Amino acid sequence: MATEDARYRQSSQYELWSFSPAQLAALREKTNSAARSRIAERLSSHPAPSSNGFSVSTSSANTPDPDGTSTPALPEFLTPAEEGLVVTFYTSELLRAGDHADMSDEIKATAAAFLRRFYVTNSIMTYPPPQMLIVALFFGCKAEGSFPSITEFGETFGKENPEEILAGEFLLCQGLRFALDVKHPFRALRGAVMELGTLPDIEATRIAAAERRARDILRFSPLITDAYFHYTPSQIMLAALSLADRGLAERLIQQTFHYVPPQPDGGADDTALLDAAAATTTTTTTTTTTTTTTTTRHTPRSGGSSQEDRAAIIGSHIRDKVLGTVEACRDMLSKELPERRGHWTNKAVIKAQIQPIRKKLNKCRDPERWNLVELQRARREQASRKADSEDDEPEANEGPTGRGGGIPGAGADGDVFGGGGGGGPGKRRTVVEKKGLDDPFGPAL
């Protein structure tokens, strides 16, 4: 039976949505740069007409052309740092909206993870965060096994037209690469509390107080930061528990990672005792999952290889590594403690930090992607025309990549799975092109 570590490493959260800080920053920079290039091209080809028939810019500067028209001057685009600030603000708004609708902690946390994941590979200059916020909440409900009526859900947030929510749902799935499983630290906290409850020298009232504080932290701090991208759920849990009661978190880690290899002259009795000690800590190691590579529970009960396996899983050197990782996560969470909820709703803060970015965003947003309802309608019409064309001329669109070689204009958004369909004329199959394997997220939306 695989350990919790081994199972977590097979999850989409680890494989697709775990990054080092440098990797995450580089990916966001790439997303911002790609959005600026696409939007600049679209703004240049979609100048706003003026009353005299000439084109006018989105800014006050115009460069005359020889034919008498004016070339639009591009607006100032958002930087990756400004995008990150706006995403954090709207994540806070999402959590407030979830509280307003009395949603569970798991639904709010899943929706927040969806929103932050979406804007790793998509720019807020391309798709509007106020609309995607509601879409993330609606889809988060379904991902966590709750299926509200779209009409009632829309009325809760003042959306009379369900299309305003449904139009962004498939976009969100594409942005998530259809990886809808989000693993949270709430269950890990329950396991840690149960483990601490078995220790006779710790008062129950202390454990209960630490649990309340840690749960309050988990409801806000990791969701508003990048903790989910950098740390495992159990590491986040230990960091929150450390903020609530550092002594309990360190005691839990010490209790788990305590194995010391026996001396060469140790007898059979020593080995038997160590086997028993390792067996008692098997449950604890699965509760406090770390980034270390672990083995299966069914390991040999004697011999040098068994001792080496135990040392690799619960040795003192692993304990030091875990403590360092938890401390780094603790520092990240401490920057956005639950007490800062009021910071993101403070009118002075919004006026000083958010409103200037909103003004820039109004000038540099994507003219073809900002209205989600119109975007969905245009894509449906495009697909319908393509289907009609295939019905009229069934052989016309067949090429080297199979039937349906490409919808005109679809290349601007790319294909989430790569290139065109494969197989014979009777099959409509989508396969990943070889070049698409270079990027686990596929081409740009």
Image (cartoon, rainbow, N blue to C red):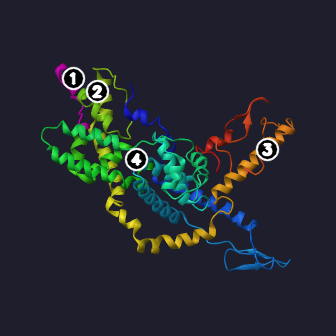
- Identify residue type, mark 4: Tyr
Query: Is 273 covered by the magenta stretch?
Result: yes
Q: In this picture, which residue range is highlighted in magenta?
A: 256-277
Label whose residue precedes the other's in the sequence (3 or 2): 2
* Residue where numbered disc 3 is placed: 386
Q: Tell me the SS state at disc 1.
A: helix
Residue 383 image position (x, y, % from top left): 75, 45
* Residue where numbered disc 1 is placed: 271
Mark nearer the viewer, 1 or 4: 4
Which labelled disc corresponds to residue 307?
2
Quadrant position of residue 259: top left
Per the model, the C-alpha gap separating discs 2 and 1 is 9 Å
Q: Where 96 falls versus 352 (above or below)?
A: above
Label whose residue precedes the other's in the sequence (2 or 1): 1
Query: Is 39 covered by the magenta stretch?
Result: no
Residue 404 image position (x, y, % from top left): 78, 39
- Identify residue type, mark 1: Thr
Label whose residue precedes the other's in the sequence (1 or 4): 4
Which labelled disc corresponds to residue 231?
4
Mark nearer the viewer, 3 or 2: 3
Quadrant position of residue 422: top right
- Identify residue type, mark 3: Lys
